Image: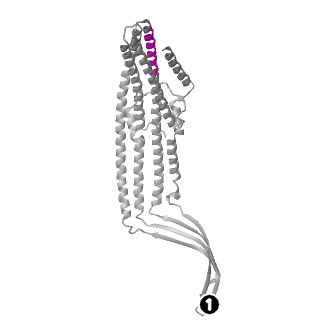
């Protein structure tokens, strides 16, 4: 029995020294690492760069296209020619050689104002990608806050289980001594041993949960899942969140609402593009061409010319199977959809905000009550430990007091964590997590 207790002590001490060797990571450092190294954030940032690169006059259709082309070809033929005046010509293996090259320029001068709308659309898409990046960062930060505080939760739960195990160890030692003296029955001793083993198993299970929480935070920070670190000792909650201030920033700072509004602008620009399809287009084209031909047979032995060509083309769409009309109608429907989507997102955000704030208030009240209750529970456990040493309470009564204390400590930690989740949710919904981005 003593060997089992000593082994447990060595196990716990080895865990303590392992913690001592790990690096402390604060919440701010975890946030900075996630912003720098999180792969989801990096991918979204690359999308923003792509949309920025697309904002050019050429991509919008303002600039001309210039192309240079050349061709060299030839042929070998057996040729027989009979002329009207009776003459004839026969040449075997007659070769024909041709070379031509040209420089062409095409410039759309007017396209129904579509080039201007295209440029505006490119800018809107870039702004939308920046909002998508902000939304991605916001979700990542929320996950980091939740994961970091989850580690504190698991860490404090492990500490409570260690404390509970220490109580079980003292109880086991008392039960063993009294059993050897004949004051306790063997059943009491065996019950104490079973409870000690059960509490030891809970510690091992909790350590695995703690490792899983750390691995998830490592993933969010773009680190190796096996990377070892320790976190702060307590969950810091804000008990004074201002309802009016958070709600006022909801409409102007909520990322989902901003994304929906930007999509409305994009759909409105799509309508202007559709209208532009109904207007005429005017384009200018010019070119400089060189042509050279040599032949061993035929009327012309050599032909060479070069020169400039140019022209204006005006095109006006008259009928295309009513496709332009259909596309305009579809675009108006998409605008209506975007407006409804914005209203839906606003309603969802407001609903989530109200639910989160009510959760925040109730969890704050429960936390304050549990903080008062925990002192009573701890005092009751101390009294039960002392009475158990004196043999004034049974093993079952002592275990009940021990479990009550364990449950109360667990509830306190859980309430702190749940309150923090509500706080982070409120900050995210109101846009406060990334207001400066």
Which residue is the extreme one toward the front? 186
User: Residue 161: image x %, image y %?
Assistant: 44, 21
Q: Residues within 10 Å of mark 1 (few under 14, many from 20)?
A: few
Q: Is residue 147 visible?
A: yes
| Span of residues in magenta | 159-177
Q: At 37% across and 54% down in the image, what residue appears? A: 334
User: In the rendered view, would you say 436 is above or below 328?
Assistant: above
Identify residue for label 1: 88
Magenta span includes 172: yes
Where is residue 324, by image quadrant? bottom left
Measured as percent of width and height from the top left, residue 413 is found at 42, 24
The residue shown at (51%, 41%) is 39
Q: Is residue 90 above or below residue 97?
A: below
Q: Position of residue 252 (x, y in %)?
A: 41, 41
User: Can the viewer see residue 301?
Assistant: no
Seen in the picture, residue 9 relative to 337 is either above or below; the reply is: above
Task: Choose between 181 and 370: the one closer to the eye.
Answer: 181
Is label 1 in a helix, a strand or a loop?
Answer: strand
Q: Main secondary structure of the magenta part?
A: helix
Which residue is nearer to you in this view: 153 or 317?
153
Magenta span has 52?
Answer: no
**Quick one: 172 or 413, which is closer to the camera?**
172
């Amino acid at each position: 029995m003593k060997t089992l207790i000593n082994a447990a002590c060595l196990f716990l001490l080895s865990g303590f020294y392992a913690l001592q060797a790990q690096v402390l990571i604060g919440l701010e450092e975890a946030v900075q690492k996630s912003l720098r190294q999180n792969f989801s954030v990096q991918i979204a940032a690359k999308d923003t760069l792509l949309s920025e690169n697309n904002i050019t006059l050429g991509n919008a259709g303002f600039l001309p296209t210039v192309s240079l082309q050349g061709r060299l070809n030839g042929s070998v033929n057996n040729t027989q020619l009979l002329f009207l005046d009776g003459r004839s010509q026969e040449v075997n293996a007659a070769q024909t050689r041709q070379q031509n090259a040209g420089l062409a320029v095409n410039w759309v001068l007017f396209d129904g104002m579509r080039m201007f709308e295209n440029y505006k659309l490119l800018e809107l898409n870039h702004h939308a990608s920046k909002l998508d990046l902000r939304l991605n960062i916001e979700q990542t930060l929320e996950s980091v806050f939740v994961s970091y505080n989850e580690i504190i939760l698991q860490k404090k739960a492990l500490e409570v289980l260690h404390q509970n195990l220490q109580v079980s160890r003292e109880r086991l030692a008392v039960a063993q001594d009294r059993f050897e003296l004949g004051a306790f029955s063997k059943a009491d001793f065996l019950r104490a041993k079973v409870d000690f083993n059960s509490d030891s198993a809970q510690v091992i299970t909790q350590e695995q949960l703690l490792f899983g929480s750390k691995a998830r935070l490592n993933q969010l920070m773009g680190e190796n899942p096996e990377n070892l670190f320790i976190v702060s000792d307590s969950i810091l909650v804000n008990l004074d969140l201002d309802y009016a201030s958070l709600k006022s920033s909801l409409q102007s700072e909520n990322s989902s609402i901003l994304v929906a509004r930007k999509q409305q602008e994009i759909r409105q620009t799509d309508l202007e593009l559709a209208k532009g399809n109904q207007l005429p287009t005017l384009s200018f084209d010019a070119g400089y061409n060189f042509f050279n031909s040599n032949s061993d047979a035929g009327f012309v032995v050599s032909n060479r010319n070069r020169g400039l060509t140019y022209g204006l083309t005006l095109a006006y769409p008259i009928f295309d199977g009513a496709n332009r009309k259909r596309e305009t109608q579809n675009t108006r429907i998409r605008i209506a959809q975007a407006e409804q989507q914005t209203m839906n997102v606003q309603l969802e955000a407001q609903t989530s905000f109200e639910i989160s704030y009510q959760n925040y208030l109730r969890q704050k009240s429960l936390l304050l009550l549990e903080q008062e209750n925990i002192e009573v529970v701890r005092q009751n456990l101390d009294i039960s430990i002392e009475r158990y040493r004196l043999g004034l309470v049974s093993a079952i009564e002592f275990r009940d007091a021990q479990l009550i204390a364990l449950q109360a400590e667990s509830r306190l930690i859980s309430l702190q964590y749940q309150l923090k989740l509500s706080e982070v949710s409120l900050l995210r919904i109101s846009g406060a997590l990334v207001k400066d981005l």
